[in-house]
Image (cartoon, rainbow, N blue to C red):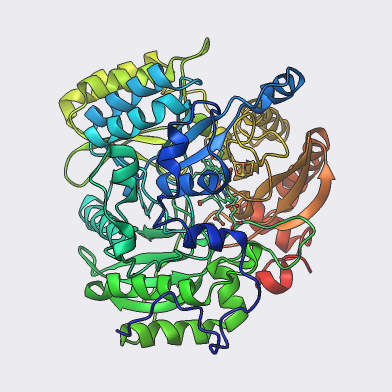
Amino acid sequence: MSNYQNNLDATDPNVVKGNLAVNERIKGESKHLRGTISEDLNDEITGGFTSDNFQLIRFHGMYQQDDRDFRGERTKQKLEPLHNVMLRARMPGGVITPSQWLAIDKFADEHTSYGSIRLTTRQTFQFHGVLKPNIKLMHQTLNSIGIDSIATAGDVNRNVLCTSNPVESVLHQQAYEWATKISEHLLPKTRAYAEVWLDGEKVEETAGQEVEPILGSNYLPRKFKTTVVIPPDNDIDVHANDLNFVAISDGENLIGFNVLVGGGLAMTFGDDSTYPRRADDFGFIELKDTLAFAAAVVTTQRDWGNRVNRKNAKTKYTLDRVGIETFKTEVENRTGIKFADSRPYEFTNRGDKIGWVEGIDGKHHLTLFIENGRLKDNADAALKSGVKAIAEIHQGDFRMTANQNLIVASVAAEQKAVIEKIAIEHGLIDASQSQQRQNSMACVAFPTCPLAMAEAERFLPEYVTQIEGLLAKHNISDEHIIFRVTGCPNGCGRAMLAEVGLVGRGPDKYNMYLGGNIAGTRVPKLYQDNISSAQVLTHMDELIGLWVAHRNDNECFGDFVIRHGIVAEVKVSSRDFHG
Ligand code: SRM
Ligand code: SF4
């Protein structure tokens, strides 16, 4: 394998020339992600992190935030925003043990201002509202139970996803092991995390003792996302990710992967050079070559990704700029191995199988639907206490899903009844929940997300009730439409792979996109621009009526709106999404 470093080679025609984005300076001067974070941590004058450190803490899995509901009031009182951090843990495949769960539950109660645990669309959990004096304690608590938050944000490879349903446990176990190996292989090698948060021994950085053989000294041009997926379940939504390993088995064991590159969902309103994009299939690789290919895709993106304009920096834009074949050939050159023809596979669904399933090992797995992934106790239900009560007696593990749900995995037959009883008592199992609710999802948005333009998580539960009303009106209460809302066009709730996706534009204003499919293999298209949530419902009423009247047998809503000519199909994003 060639020894490619983070070169920005001026003679390479595939490197974008121009003034580098400011983040490049920040990363380059950060002494391998240390910056002056430790000094900031001891600065009691402000609750926040200053200048470059504001960006650098992201590489350690944290974002600086404040509660937007109270921002105006504090400004009036001439107070700085009440700065705190959100932490996102690194949990490849979303696996967490009951004892780890009990520790994070306790930390959320004692040291977060929202008292909640938030399951994310990338199979992990977030704490919201941790004040500066508790940040070190947080990392040390996590470290004591074998959890870290390295590289869950920033311009690096993020938490590696893995199909979470453990029904097919042999294959799942193998896929999960690869997700863990890939995560470790692509992690930053800097000791900065241990030094800053765990009081680890200081490495004399200037002595050049540290190198980042894969990520390079300036790390990646932009965030990078990887999955391992087991067809026919596309529960981790491959097309939202830069790099996907699609598991190919001989019927029993994993034998290799088809490699899909270049997915991603974010866009910027008014900038047609940005768009959500499906990943392209590069071909089949053998299992033994997995890490080499992972590194080759990452280093190609590292060297060719746009470091001038961050809006066009992700792998999806690199592919469209240099050409899919050029990128693929470069990956082959870097590994010294050619892709074989892709092996056949099919995705048929994305949703989690809510309820009990029996695995092939005779163990039982209970998938709990957690609306918007928010675990918190409130007047209606004590969801967080319920999971804690299960963790106190559970002998298997938990798996967080990429649909913001939680699987109580590997339950012995004799424990089923008691776990189910706890889940029912705490509202974690609710037989009245519709398919529609279970197939609806929103990103966090207000009050913690600084980028939110419209409500998402807080607005969804009541809104789904209204959509349920429309399905009932048209006599199809048992059916569902994959419905997702994101508070801005960054797409964290993956609305850009939904049958109906709402994307926030401003207070109670959304763009309405139609035409994703059940398998998650199609990007939807703009149907209505900048309309209110009430107007969305009027359109939904009409569209559901048309669907019921004119659909073919078993035709899903997303397929129908395209066949019926309501929106055009997005085949190639760079051409069709805005066109
Ligand atoms: Fe995201 C930024 C929340 C999955 C695309 N995302 C953010 C931030 C950190 C806002 C910020 O930059 O300050 C949000 C914090 C909100 C909060 O208060 O918690 C945020 N993203 C989330 C989560 C928690 C949404 C959720 O409801 O679960 C998800 C955490 C995932 C994780 O555990 O790592 C989350 N974000 C996604 C996804 C979906 C996915 O990966 O499957 C996407 C779209 C896929 C993609 O990357 O194309 C996504 N988030 C973004 C972007 C746009 C990136 C881009 O390509 O331009 C941003 C903004 C940015 O990076 O500049 C962003
Ligand atoms: Fe925030 Fe936008 Fe992501 Fe929602 S989609 S969490 S509003 S960045």
Q: Which quadrant is home to the C terminus?
A: bottom right
User: Between residues 397 and 358, which one lies in front from this camera angle?
Assistant: 397
Instruction: Give the x, y percent position of residue 25.
Output: 55, 62
For residue 271, what is the image quadrant? Answer: bottom right
Identify the residue at horizontal 83%, vertical 45% (top origin): 530
For residue 523, what is the image quadrant? Answer: bottom right
Identify the residue at horizontal 41%, vertical 23% (top origin): 429
Instruction: Give the x, y percent position of residue 206.
Output: 34, 61
Res 309 seen here? yes
Left of 505 or right of it: where is 24?
Answer: left
**Residue 206 vertical placement versus 369 (above, below):** below
Left of 214 or right of it: where is 520?
Answer: right
Q: How many circles with numbers are drawn on the protein? A: 0
User: Between residues 265 and 250, which one lies in front from this camera angle?
Assistant: 265
Identify the residue at horizontal 70%, vertical 20% (top origin): 74
Left of 82 or right of it: where is 225?
Answer: left
Instruction: Give the x, y percent position of residue 199.
Output: 27, 38
Res 481 seen here? no
Q: Which quadrant is home to the N terminus?
A: bottom left
Instruction: Give the x, y percent position of residue 14.
Output: 56, 84
**Residue 90 vertical placement versus 80 (above, below):** below
